[in-house]
Amino acid sequence: MPFAAGNSARPPLRTPTIIDTSINGYLVHRMTDVTNRGPDAAPRLSRVDGLTRREFVLSGGALAAAALVPSPSRAAASRRDYRLVSSAARLSLVGAGRPPTALWCFNGQVPGPEIRVRLGQSLGIAVDNRLDGDTTVHWHGLRIANAMDGVPGLTQPPIAAGASFAYEFTPPDAGTFWYHPHVRSSEQQGRGLHGVLIVDEPSPIAVDRELVWVLDD
């Protein structure tokens, strides 16, 4: 209720409202008792968990700065690491009792291992080349920096036989993508060097069942 400074009347007292808020493990206790003080009352410092308001505001800067430094658990949750080994192998593709097929594959399987990350997480993928010739890995459909795009002679030198290369990027889009070499692509992909990369939405989509299919003809 508005009133003039010279008015002898005082507004009726209200019961203070107390708000407790937890911030990063600190309990912030705030009491909204300003309306119970007259306009001529001397200013006073209220206490917040043993701190004055001024001390609390100053300490807030330190808390904000601390929040910007990732803890080990938070840093681990924000990145996923994989290793892909490209090599020759002989695998049975048509069932038991049939001769195995000579293939080139990632981690001894065709298709290669599923790489999965949540939108906002960074990826670290180390690629070891155990083939007899050069290779790379291209992340098909992902909008990432050229240096990580895996196109030999254009965005990176090819990964020589016996060498390794570390890809690091954060996918900007959710969706289903795939990875494959960009060195003699038709041959290396055709022999089995390909796999799926899935970037999940921040909030999981409710589905009855999820199946990942990789079709190659």
Image (tube, rainbow, N blue to C red):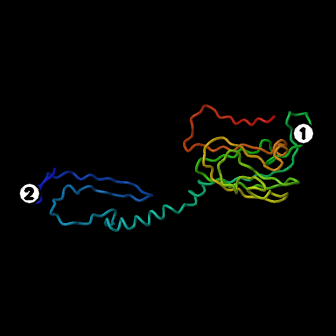
Q: Which mark is residue 46?
A: none
Q: Amino acid at mark 1?
A: Pro
Q: Residues within 10 Å of mark 1 (few under 14, many from 20)?
A: some
Q: Which residue lies most toward the left here? A: 8
Horizontal relation, residue 171 to residue 40: left or right: right
- In the rendered view, tell whether residue 91 sits above or below residue 34: above
SS type, badge 1: loop
Q: Which residue lies most toward the top here? A: 208
Q: Nearer the viewer, mark 1 or mark 2?
A: 2
Q: Which mark is residue 7?
A: 2
Horizontal relation, residue 98 to residue 47: left or right: right
Which residue: 91% across, 34% down? 98
Q: Residues within 10 Å of mark 2 (few under 14, many from 20)?
A: few
SS type, badge 2: loop
Residue 202, given in percent of the width and then of the height, sits at 56, 45
Instruction: Tell me which numbered mark, 1 or 2, is placed earlier along the sequence.
Output: 2
Residue 208, given in percent of the width and then of the height, sits at 61, 31
> Dot 1 corresponds to which residue?
100
> For the residues marked 1 and 2, what is the alpha-carbon distance in whole angstroms?
99 Å
Q: Foreground: 14 or 84?
A: 84
Residue 46, given in percent of the width and then of the height, sits at 27, 64
Which residue: 85% across, 46% down? 104
Q: Amino acid at mark 2?
A: Asn
Residue 159, given in percent of the width and then of the height, sits at 80, 57
Within the image, what quadrant is residue 165 found in? bottom right
Q: Foreground: 101 or 156?
A: 156
* Count of residue discs: 2
Horizontal relation, residue 138 to residue 24: left or right: right
